[in-house]
Amino acid sequence: MNLVKTNLTIWILRIVVVLTIAIDMLSNKHFTLSKFFWLLFGLMLIQLNDLLRVYVLKNRSNNGLYQLSLALSILSIALYVYLLDSFATNIYYIFPIFEMFMGAATVRLWLLALHAAVYLALVYSLNNSLQDTLLSYLATLLVVFLFRQNQLEKNKVKSLNEELLTANIKLLENARQLREITIVKERTDIAQELHDNLGHSLVALRMHLEFAGQVLDNRPDRSAEAINKALDISQAAMSSLRKAVSVLKEDALSRGVQLQESINELIRSMKMVSNLKFDLHFDPACEEALPALKDGIYRTVQEAVTNGLKHGQAERFWISIAVDRTGSMIKVLVENDGANCTSIVKSHGLRGIEERIRLLRGTVRFSSGLSSGFTIAADLPYAAGKGEGMK
């Protein structure tokens, strides 16, 4: 985002400088009207060449044509410096340096050498002070170089932060999966315990009751003893059953992780390692949705945030999850302030969101703002599950 603002500032300054050059040409008494129009036409051609280079050649990775275009701009601007030798033209000659240092991954040394050689030739031709102009030129190169290094460091830090956020999201997902595995294991252990203890108790209870029935007439004392023993066994079985039910209830409470709580946990985790800002609007009625639906909503929000960070370099997110007025649909909206895109190319993440929403019999739309921002809007059929937690 900072690089975009920097480039915008440079283009605004470029427009001001070009207009100043045009005014200087108009006020120059040595230029005839026809010469003025020819120079103005040439100035417009330089702008056209710059626009084509920055927005067409560079995007298509035509490195050879791009470098040739930049070299042509350097030579053309040098001509105007020679003809006018004004403050505006000298400032204008610096712009290719900004482009070489800020607009490319690597600095082309031959272009830098061409720029420096032409500058020295201009200084000699215009009989300017070599010492003063050379110091100014070197100072400009140093400032631009330091600015580039600072920008590269910022990009590196930003890239590391994005990797850290991605790793953090994966850790959250692994923790959720581990929790699910633990829940399954606890259920299996409880089921095995119920089978072993209650099964044994029921068999023993049946044997004692059968024995009591067999000796009831001949040995009433033994029958009463067997019945008392059966009562003890049933009481122990009921106690074991109560413990198992108590554990299951506690497990159900621990498993009843709410959707809003899960999303807030995701937000808190991201805020710990970044300066991201989140605005969450959550309708409590969504907690009544079926676990599969809540899990799909969570994963959609998670992927939408990850996608905004990775592809849009977003810094702020607006998340809304609510049941509509009819009570039949849940509307999920995730917006960010990241870079816009004129044509939406569906990444693996966006395709994953589409597939997940489709399996839940919902619809999803992707859109981008004119200048910035990206929006993911999904509509899902609302199926209530009476407050069950996420699974």
Image: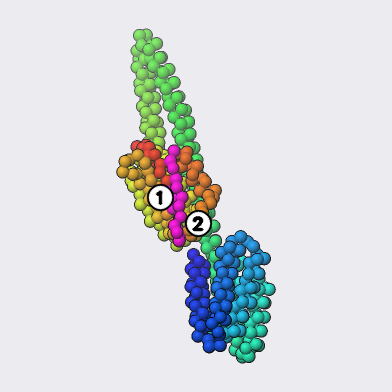
Q: Compared with residue 291, is residue 370 higher up or lower down, i.e. above or below?
A: below
Per the model, the C-alpha gap separating discs 2 and 1 is 20 Å
Question: Depth check: 232 or 53 in front?
Answer: 53
Tell me if 115 is positioned left or right of 367 in this view.
Answer: right
Question: Which residue is identified by label 1?
Answer: 333
Q: Quadrant of residue 106?
A: bottom right
* Residue 43 in view of the camera: no
Q: Residue at x 61, y 60 (%)?
A: 60
Can you name the residue that lies furthest to the left here? 325
Q: Compared with residue 205, is residue 72 higher up or lower down, i.e. above or below?
A: below
Q: Compared with residue 389, is residue 101 higher up or lower down, i.e. above or below?
A: below
Question: Which residue is identified by label 2?
Answer: 342
Which disc, if any, is residue 388?
none
Q: Residue at x 63, y 61 (%)?
A: 61
Q: Position of residue 335 (x, y in %)?
A: 42, 54
Looking at the image, is mark 2 or mark 1 earlier in the sequence?
Answer: 1
Q: Compared with residue 118, is residue 225 higher up or lower down, i.e. above or below?
A: above
Overall secondary structure of the magenta section? strand
Residue 374 painted magenta:
yes
Q: Residue at x 54, y 65 (%)?
A: 155
Q: Badge 1: few (under 14), some or many (20 or more) residues near its Cα, within 10 Å?
A: many
Q: Which is more foreground, mark 2 or mark 1? A: 2
Q: Please state which amino acid type lies under the numbered disc 2.
A: Thr
Q: Residue at x 55, y 85 (%)?
A: 31
Q: Position of residue 169 (x, y in %)?
A: 50, 52
Q: Which residues are magenta?
A: 361-377
**Looking at the image, do the residues carrying marks 2 and 1 touch, with CB atoms under 8 Å apart?**
no
Question: Depth check: 177 or 220 in front?
Answer: 177
SS for tag 2?
loop
* Residue 206 in view of the camera: yes
Q: Position of residue 336 (x, y in %)?
A: 44, 56
Q: Please state which amino acid type lies under the numbered disc 1.
A: Leu
